[in-house]
Image (cartoon, rainbow, N blue to C red):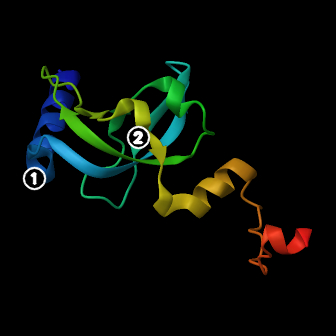
Amino acid sequence: MTSKRLKLMQLSLVDEVPELNKVFFLDVFAESYYDTGKKRMRLNTINGQRVPCDIKVSCPAKLVSSYPEGTIFKLDARLIRRGDGKQPYFMAINRTRLQRALEFFEYNLKVQNGFDFVFPKKGRIVARHAIQS
């Protein structure tokens, strides 16, 4: 009985969010995390968008696992509804060209280099041909 009620709650949540009546979504931001159950890297949507957070994103694990956990990606996605009260999920479009989000460039650098990473100060750039002369 409890699982039936939970399924109804999930369905009603999807029906109350008007953004989920669309099929294609552009510029969705998702963060990578390690799924211990599947033993691989996966993506979940992040807060602050027109889509609810924590919706799973289907994409090639090989592309996501080439970056550290916590990396944020920007992608176009298609909403997949499976029915039977199962949670909807996104499927990444252009799955072979998944890229990190430029909007989160500094954050992604901190994820890769550690959160105590200090950005190098912008110095004077000297042209290579000036050094050789």
Please determine whether, in this image, residue 100 is positioned above or below residue 83: below
Q: Please tell me how crowded label 1 is: few (under 14), some (14-19), or many (20+) other residues with Cα within 10 Å.
A: few
Residue 122: x and y, percent? 74, 77
Q: Gap between marks 2 and 1, in whole Å? A: 20 Å
Q: In which quadrant of the rendered view does residue 107 lie?
A: bottom right
Marked residue nearer the N-terminal end (2 or 1): 1
Residue 38: x and y, percent? 49, 18
* Name of the residue lying farthest toward the front: 133
Check disc 1 and report the residue beneath it. 18
Check disc 2 and report the residue beneath it. 44
Residue 58 in view here:
no
Work out whether residue 66 or residue 69 is closer to the camera in this orientation and state it.
66
The quarter of the picture where the C terminus appears is: bottom right
At 35% from the left and 34% from the top, the residue drawn is 57
Residue 44: x and y, percent? 41, 40
Residue 5 in view here:
yes
Q: Please tell me how crowded label 2 is: few (under 14), some (14-19), or many (20+) other residues with Cα within 10 Å.
A: many
At 68% from the left and 48% from the top, the residue drawn is 112
